[in-house]
Amino acid sequence: MGRFLKAFKSLENQKTCIYACFTFDSLSTGMREVEGWLSSRGVRFKRVMDPTPEFVFPDLKVLYNEGRFPSIIEVRDELSRAFYLFSIPVPLNMEGFMKPEFVLAFRLRVKRASKLS
């Protein structure tokens, strides 16, 4: 019974990160559609244009600490891309929106706050 409780406790301390990628003919059209869709669902997001990993890293700390489902949406065209970073309490239902090129979901282990600061 102790093993079961320990395993359940470890699942409880995990978050699921969702990464979805959408491709459009025009980046500005894609950004307008994604921003409208997120706003209609009351999601507060941060938009980042062609970031470097060093630029995104500080935002990921905040994203990780906020909701249970840290999420990243990538919008791209042939030449450039934009990312939308947000964290929500429940998984975002993408039905009713266009089909993404791909979606990845993976588990993140929750770190102690002292290690993220």
Image (tube, rainbow, N blue to C red):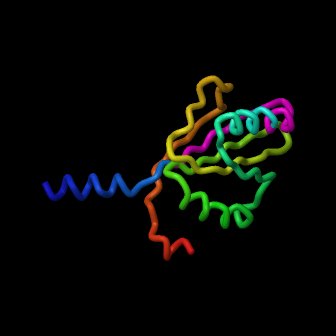
Q: Is residue 81 above or below residue 64?
A: above
The part of the chain drawn in magenta is 17-31
Q: Is residue 47 above or below residue 109?
A: above
Q: Position of residue 111 (x, y in %)?
A: 46, 66
Q: Is residue 55 above or below residue 47?
A: below
Residue furthest to the left in view is 1
The residue positioned 65% from the left and 43% from the top of the image is 43
Q: Is residue 87 left or right of residue 31?
A: left
The residue positioned 79% from the left and 31% from the top of the image is 24
Q: Position of residue 8 (x, y in %)?
A: 27, 52
The residue positioned 81% from the left and 35% from the top of the image is 32
Q: Which of 1/26 is in front?
A: 1
Instruction: Please state the total of marks drawn on the protein image.
Output: 0
Q: Position of residue 105 (x, y in %)?
A: 51, 43
Q: Is residue 84 left or right of residue 106?
A: right
The residue positioned 60% from the left and 47% from the top of the image is 71
Q: Quadrant of the N terminus?
A: bottom left
Q: Is residue 34 left or right of residue 91?
A: right
In reply to whether residue 25 is colored magenta, the answer given is yes
In reply to whether residue 99 is colored magenta, the answer given is no
